[in-house]
Amino acid sequence: MEEKNDLIKLKQAYAELGLPEDADREALDNRYYVLTRRARTQKMREHGEAPAGERVDEDKVNAAYRFIKDYEEAQAKDAYARETYGSDPKKAARAVKRAHFFHYYKFHILGAIVLLIAIGYGIKSYVDHRHEQAELAKLPPVDVSVMFFGNYLYGDGINPDMTNVEADILKQFPDWKRVVASLTYVPAETRSEQDMALLQKSMLVLMTDKSDLYIMDKINFEKLAPQEGLLPLDGDDFPASVQVKSKTDADTAERVYGVDLSGSSLMKALGLQGTTEFIAGIRGNAKHPDQAKAFMRHYLGGS
């Protein structure tokens, strides 16, 4: 019944435009253009008067044109649905609705998927963090933490497993229970975007790291010492030959901020590659400064 009514309305729409029912799209558009232009001309005339044969009802023309266009579009969609989803009209209609749903709501669906992934990742990270904290709680307290900061390489990659280094250091101190070692690779020169990224990362590490002892190459010691990040060592009686001095922005007097361990056989035995410069400095607010000094003295003894 509805289809029959649409056919009647379609016939009336073509009649309103003065077109045969088999007129193609080009004829439809051309006729619509002629009639709307005539309607605008009609409005421009005084009092809107026009000969009876030329009078155009613009509202009816627009309605007829839209109805024909909508009808043709609906017919095209139905034909596509039958060709794509089969001849059963009900199944085709359901398939079209599903396709339209995913088309119009695809970004909502993708957003929901991303949100679920983010929530899952957050939960996993939280669980992993709790597990890590629980495992750390079982370990003995840290006696000293050491960071190698500079053009150093160890093992595979730039984020190596330092377990063996920790074990080697711990062997030198029988009374200690635990040593934590880390390595932050700082490229000697910035020749690529990756080098720049690594340099930026190293700056972020310095801002957040809480290691007691820094082992640095010369260039990074010279960058770090003036920033008042290291503990002065003037009164600790380290041999003058291994004292490394610097000035800070707040103190123009030269003070000892580092101890050169580059000649230490024990330091070389740790197996780090890259630079052969090892300048030890203690972080200004180190948690274990005495153990850090003990480390420096012991490794000097292995020179």
Image (cartoon, grey):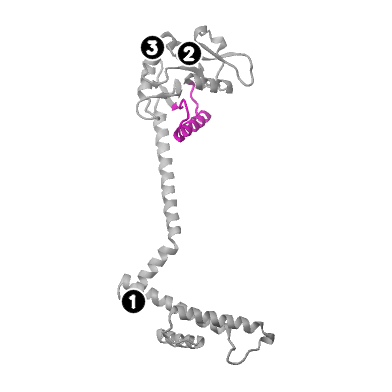
The image shows residue 22 at horizontal and vertical percentages of: 41, 85
- Residue at 41% of width from left, 45% of height from top? 121
Could you classify mark 2 by the number of other residues whose Cα lies within 10 Å: few (under 14), some (14-19), or many (20 or more)? many
Q: Is residue 224 above or below residue 195?
A: above
- The amino acid on which the numbered mark 3 sits, given as a three-letter code, is Ser
Position of the N terminus by quadrant: bottom left
Q: Nearer the viewer, residue 118 or 260?
A: 260
State how far apart marks 1 and 2 are (Cα). Answer: 85 Å
Verify CB contact (< 8 Å) between mark 1 and mark 2.
no
Is any atom of residue 120 visible in this view? yes
Q: Secondary structure at mark 3?
A: helix
Could you classify mark 3 by the number of other residues whose Cα lies within 10 Å: few (under 14), some (14-19), or many (20 or more)? some
User: Residue at label 1?
Assistant: 89
State how far apart marks 1 and 3 are (Cα). Answer: 86 Å
Verify CB contact (< 8 Å) between mark 2 and mark 3.
no
Q: Is residue 238 magenta?
A: no
The image shows residue 259 at horizontal and vertical percentages of: 50, 13
Is any atom of residue 288 visible in this view? no
Q: Residue 265: give its label.
A: 3
Mark 1 or mark 2: which comes first in sequence? 1
Position of the C terminus by quadrant: top left
Which range is magenta? 184-213
- The amino acid on which the numbered mark 1 sits, given as a three-letter code, is Pro
Q: Say left or right for 233 vs 116.
A: right
User: Residue at label 2?
Assistant: 260
Q: Is residue 200 magenta?
A: yes
Mark 1 or mark 3: which comes first in sequence? 1
Mark 2 or mark 3: which comes first in sequence? 2
Q: Secondary structure at mark 2?
A: strand
